[in-house]
Image (cartoon, rainbow, N blue to C red):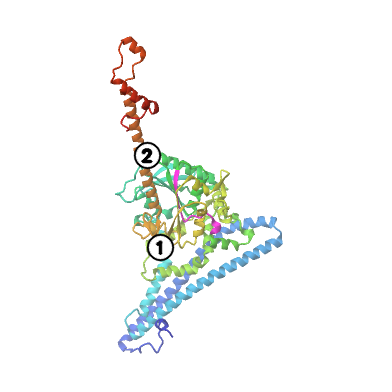
Amino acid sequence: MSESKVATRLLTAEDAPQPEILPEKVLDLQAKLISASIDQARLLQTYWVGLSRYCLDFLAPTFSALESFVALEKDHLEQQPPERLLLDHLSLLEFNLRLTGQGFNIGLKALSDFQAQQLEQGYRAWINTLCDQPGEDIAAFMARQARLLELVVHDYPKAIRDIEPEYGFHFDDGTYVKTAETERFLLYQVLPRNKDVRVRSGGKPVLIIPPYVLGANILAFLPDEGKSFVHCFANQGIPTYIRIVKDIDTTPAVQVMTGEDDCLDTKYFLEQISAAHKRPATLCGYCQGGFTAIINYLSGELDGLVDALITSVAPMDGTKSAGLAAFLAQIPPLFEDIRFALKTLPNGNRVVNGRLMSWVYKLKSIEKDNPIFTFIRDIKLFERTLKINKTAAAINYWLLYDQTDLPLEICKLSYDSYTIPVAADGTLPVRLFNRPLNFSRVKEKGLPWLICVADKDDLVEKESALAPTAWVDAEVTVFPKGHVAIATSWSLPDSECSLDQCFLDFRGPVRFHLDLEDQADKAAAAASRQAARERARSKTAKSSSAAIPPPASVAETETTGTAASPAAAPMATALEPADQSSPSTPLTED
């Protein structure tokens, strides 16, 4: 047996020191055993309550999907032959059983590994108790485990709800200015949280487009903690704007919105921004917002209003997401229908169920997102410190409460981009204003484009986000960690991959924007100096021409009876060639 195995094996009865039970310690031992038994009963009760809750929360979207499923299957009964329906439903059942088994096996493995670790700790606590050794005894161990389970099952959900005042956007707190509005969107300017920073009114502005289904709040994660994507721009004095979609439940215009509506509203906002700051803006899209931003630009409607583009973890060709493509390939063709995700609102409009769409991504990553695995992961998260940190609470608030429903036509654009690949010439599978959209247009227009990806992103895989680089010479920045780290971990200014700094061989999106602003300002200053020189030259030339009297004409000589002086003749002769070739050339040019 190797040294490492010896070091990690459990103590055996022979290894353990022989206990010496003294009469005065019997009562203390009994008290510890009674306390441990009570805490164990409390622990087991909390454990099963927590595990049941995690499973029910995971399955909750299925109940909201039943209405659409039943309604659509009624149509299938009338349209499809019975044998075809039987085969498709059997295939669906087989897919569900396989997915359930895969998630259950992963969950059981996580559970068994965790229980083995707890068993070892409990055994050592027993030895410490019986042999009166220093270290955690069985009573302290059981009390700690019971407290850990109560923290995860009872305190953690409360901490998630309580983080709401600190998480995301609160547009009534005086740090945002509403600057424009359409039927579907609101435009807010994000002011710096740093009171020492002033917005540069003549600076290069940026318009940030958040995702639809995951909401905008993830981009203002914990602003008072310094973790906020939008405030990382604003705290540099950059004129920072964000487009906020109105509540879909109460706004019919949002419920029936099309891609063309999205584009025209964005154009209107950009016109307001460019007019206010006298220069074009950078269009910055996060996740699905990045896909929205690029197709809006490719439509041609934003020409002259946008001179740079930033996309972060944005799916550009969903078919290149190997994990999602493999998952979708397992679904029977009959059920590859976006109508299964629809729900009907009281006014009759139909929208896409946002919770159900986000659940699809959980099913795709069943190895990491199944309820048993998630429950054990949360227990391990707090096992060492028994404290709940704000970042964990805010992340879970986003996951639990920020999913919103989507307009059907907007969802179709994303759905097509995930099921139909980009053509060989760079043409996207979607259209706006019935115009073809091609990535090559970015290169033709010379638009600077920064594509930010996450190294361990299992939601939008790098291959999907980097698809445009086959046709565009875009700059690429690779961040560590996963999908939301750019908006959370790396938006902290003193982090190792801060958005406003260069790290490794990459530039963060804020640094990219600031460098573009600096280049544009230098180019504008050089052009201004050149124009000033040209005006000075023109003014000097005009003044010189006006100061030289014209040569006397023959008629004037005859009338006055006098001739030009000999000294004037050579000067007139010398000026004639210069006047003929370049009337605006100043006398001092040589």
- What is the quadrant of residue 479 in the picture? bottom left
Secondary structure at numbered mark 1: helix
Q: Nearer the viewer, residue 34 or 306?
A: 306
**Residue drawn at x 43%, y 55% as measured from the top left:** 218
What x and y, as percent, mark residue 590? 32, 33
User: Residue 392 has which mark?
Assistant: 1
Of 484 and 452, nearer the camera is: 452
> Along the horizontal axis of the image, is 552 left or right of 273?
left
Residues at marks 1 and 2, CA–CA distance in whole angstroms = 50 Å
- Name the amino acid type tagged 1: Ala
Give the crowd class for mark 2: few <14, some 14-19, many >=20 residues within 10 Å: few
Q: Which amino acid type is shown beneath numbered disc 2?
A: Ala
Kindly identify which numbered label has been placed on residue 527: 2
Residue 176 is at least partly visible in this image: no
Q: Where 560 sits versus 464, above or below? A: above
Segment colored magenta: 306-320
Q: Nearer the viewer, residue 490 or 80?
A: 490
Q: Which x, y percent locates residue 388?
A: 38, 65
